[in-house]
Image: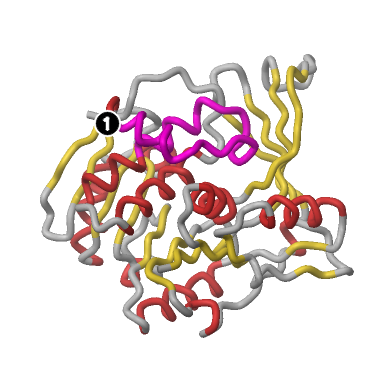
Amino acid sequence: MTILCYGEIDLDIYLALDRLPSLNKAADVTDEFENVGGAAANSALWLANWGVPTRLAGHDLGDDAAGRAVLDALAAQPQLDFSFVASHSDYRSPRCQCLVTPDGERSFIMHWLDDLRMTAPSAEMFAGVSWLNLDMSGPLPLRLQAAEMAAARGIPALINDIYAADHPLLPLVDVLVISASIVRSRLPACDPLDLARELQAHANCAVIVTDSGEDLNILSRDGFSQTIRPPALRAIDTTGAGDIFKSGLLYGLRQGLPLAQAARWGAAAGSLMCQYAGTTKTLAPLGSVRDMLEAVV
């Protein structure tokens, strides 16, 4: 069965810097390259590379050098169906500059967000789909429509980055992934686990709380809690780590693993990705993810 990744697709411009630039001091570039980016595309490419039938849709591309580079990379994956990724001659492909510092942290500069186009979900897009992987990196209406179509067909949805109990997507979630660091940034008075329990109770969904390489907390639908400790590794680049965590999680869920065991696959995949520069420049083989599982407690 196919996994549908719906959402963000762009071309990333990767820049490794010695420091972030400031008003009075420029940064030096130590490495640069381009690779496919965007949350949906990141997840889809890693899944397809592991031999999982995957479908990608969401943000459109332009008939320009950036768009053609993205399409060429997608075409290199036999298990990836990107027939729903539209291309327009009068449109600039979405691009993102990823500024990565020596500690592995990243900042982003987005191009052309005001002109963003998306392909609406359709019945054909959901044919043969067993999971919907939905990201929140862009306009809400079509993402909401995709989740509604999945729910109407009994297709479970994995969604990330919902931080309010009244969010319209929350009732449509089966597994929600949130970031403790984002909670602390946006809601400094709120404990991430308390928020996770509130969201879990409100939507009757499972919630996974990631924490930038620290322990992951998993709340099942019945409120049962488990903890996973990712490997202690020095990150080279954390860009897209959450997207690849979702890829590993989906791989495990597709195999029929319990949520906590599937989350171990997510932790292994996300940790492994942080050892590479660029989210999709290097696609780790499934065997490397399996080897990394041994370091996930």
The residue stretch that appears in magenta: 267-293
Is 18 located above or below residue 113 in the figure?
Answer: above
- On screen, residue 278 versus residue 254, left or right, reads right
- Element marked by disc 1: loop
Given the image, on which type of amino acid does mark 1 rest? Answer: Asp
- On screen, residue 255 versus residue 245, left or right, reads left
Is 84 located above or below residue 227 in the figure?
Answer: below
Q: Give the residue at x 23% y 53%.
A: 257
In front of the other: 1 or 214: 1
In front of the other: 170 or 165: 170
Q: Quadrant of the N terminus?
A: bottom left
Magenta highlight on residue 290: yes
Q: Quadrant of the C terminus?
A: top left
Quarter of the rendering containing residue 132 = bottom left
Q: Position of residue 153 (x, y in %)?
A: 36, 82
Q: Give the residue at x 18% y 61%.
A: 201
Quarter of the rendering containing residue 268 = top left
Is 110 located above or below residue 57 in the figure?
Answer: above
Q: Position of residue 18 (x, y in %)?
A: 69, 15
- On screen, residue 22 versus residue 244, left or right, reads right
Is 151 located above or below residue 236 in the figure?
Answer: below
Color style of the picture:
secondary structure
Quarter of the rendering containing residue 148 = bottom left
Q: Give the residue at x 54% y 77%.
A: 125
Q: Give the residue at x 53% y 48%.
A: 49
Residue linked to disc 1: 215
